[in-house]
Amino acid sequence: MTTLKSATIEPGISAFALYLPPLRVPLERWCDWTGASWSKVKSVAGHSFRMMAPRESVYTLAANAALKLILDNDIDPQNVGMLALGTESSTDNSAGAVQVRGLLDEALRQLGKAPLSVHCEVPEVKHACLGGIYALKNAARFVATDGLGQQAIVVSVDIAEYALGSSGEQTQGAGAVAMLVESEPKLLALELSHCGSASAYRGADFRKPIRRFFMDAYPSQGRLHDFPVFNGRYSTFCYLDQTRRAFAQMVSKLGQGAGEVLEESAAVLFHRPYHYMPIQGMAAIYVQALLSSDEGRAELESLASSAGVTVEAVMAELEAPSWSMVPQDQAEASVDPCPALSAVAKLARRSEAFGTLVGRKMSLGSELMKQCGNMYTAALPAWLAAALYDALGQGLALEGQRVVALGYGSGDAAEALPMRVVPGWQEAAARIGFEAALEGAVDLEQSQYEALHGGQQVEGFEGLPARGFFVRRIGQENQPRFQDIGLEYWGFEAFEQRS
């Protein structure tokens, strides 16, 4: 019996903690500034997004989430064998998670607690918005193998910023989500052997080449920005293709039909750069799932006929090898590699059956997420946390039910993670405190937003954040005998602990 248990370890997530920076841009107000349609922005993007305060950085955001996780869940820092950082917003190309470790150790000492173990692994994982999910899988493997008996903390953190006036401006955001990973999880058990993966190189999907900083065509807007190089329409094609392929492999490993997996799952949650993108992803998977039953095939035939395409054309696109078209110009980036599937999925999104599916499988936590904005690697972990917190508030009985998490990272890769809600999940879910993380926001006026976006000082904001970690100063020395130019030096003011 003991041997069987050790051979069937299902590691997973025992706790979540969320940190959002204090500055908020309400999108209805942003629409007044820019002349954008509020009804459209509300339905596509959400309600608001966050911006870092002047004294914050990607590392202080991460440390704030990780410290909340430790304190709220009474974690023994000496038992943490891995602190993994998933991000695409690193500002140091040498050290990553170890910097978060340094912040945590200093704060834990100030609070009279032990620091993290000297034997703690500190990897940073980067693959666009998928880095946090890759880090989660890595941590799950760790606690199930050489780290058995230890805990792992995974922090997904990012800062999403786009140029003023760009098509991505309303999809900005910043935030961090920390996850506690254990071999005997208290929230979600991860079915590692059934995870699905997909990847392909796709050039100009969404990239951040360092060389762009030194080219005249790149917008500076007053300071060094981390604006991505992206092609929206092409990026959508990539997202839809990879998520459905990862989902298909997961379904195959589960030995079930796609329709059966959708039906039996309590929630199907996607990487969420903005509100509408996961709905598009679900539509592509929905069309794929229609092939699972005779009733579904009949619906697919009707949709295909209305769209002016054949079922055979849709099936050919679904079954085709992964395409790796690397566009060289705007015309090539606008070519849909799966036109028949796209036409049918577009009609499917308007159907009553699909609307019902979205309501049943994608509504948990969705309203909470509309207030967060885009957090890149942290977007999917945040939705998982929001969904469980929402389910607890509704009194739903989720024990034993499956939750599917579909992660995506531009450039281009996806992961489909099947998880099971474990018995007694309610106690851990109650500590998530998602709504508390949304409190205390400072809404920006247009002049304040534009000034902060350009890296300018704004009167009254110099001391933010008032609590938690902050950047105390930036090193300036660049002499032969001592150099610290560009290095962050941090400070810490204790925030209130949960009772």
Image (cartoon, rainbow, N blue to C red):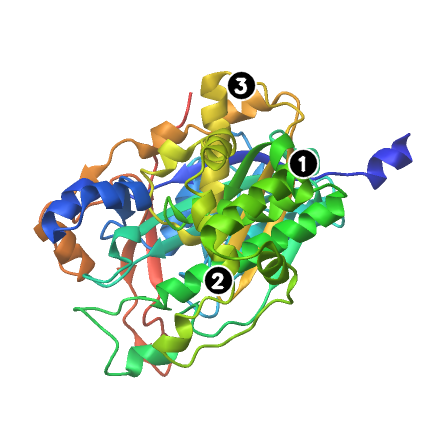
Identity, as a three-letter code, of the amino acid under mark 3: Leu
- Marks 1/2: CA–CA distance: 26 Å
Q: Which mark sits nearer the N-terminus, 1 or 2?
A: 1
Q: Residues within 10 Å of mark 1 (few under 14, many from 20)?
A: few
Q: Is residue 58 above or below residue 203?
A: above
Q: Is residue 379 visible?
A: no
Identity, as a three-letter code, of the amino acid under mark 2: Pro
Q: Disc 1 vs disc 2: Cβ atoms closer than 8 Å?
A: no
**Left or right position of 67 against 84:** left
Identity, as a three-letter code, of the amino acid under mark 1: Glu
- Marks 3/1: CA–CA distance: 21 Å
Q: Is residue 490 visible?
A: yes
Looking at the image, is mark 3 or mark 1 nearer the viewer?
A: 1
Q: Which labelled disc corresponds to residue 192?
A: none
Out of 324 and 65, give the one closest to the viewer. 324
- Could you tell me residue 21's position as x and y percent? 30, 44
- Could you tell me residue 446's position as x and y percent? 10, 49
Q: Which labelled disc corresponds to residue 260?
A: 1
Q: Residues within 10 Å of mark 3 (few under 14, many from 20)?
A: few
- Could you tell me residue 422's position as x and y percent? 65, 27
Based on the displayed image, in which of its 4 quarters is residue 476 positioned? bottom left
Return the residue at label 3. 396
Looking at the image, is mark 1 or mark 2 nearer the viewer?
A: 2
- Could you tell me residue 416's position as x and y percent? 61, 49
**Left or right position of 275 against 48:** right
Looking at the image, is mark 2 or mark 3 nearer the viewer?
A: 2
- Marks 2/3: CA–CA distance: 39 Å
Q: Is residue 454 above or below residue 291?
A: below
Return the residue at label 2. 339
Q: Tag 2, which secondary structure?
A: helix
Q: Tag 1, which secondary structure?
A: helix
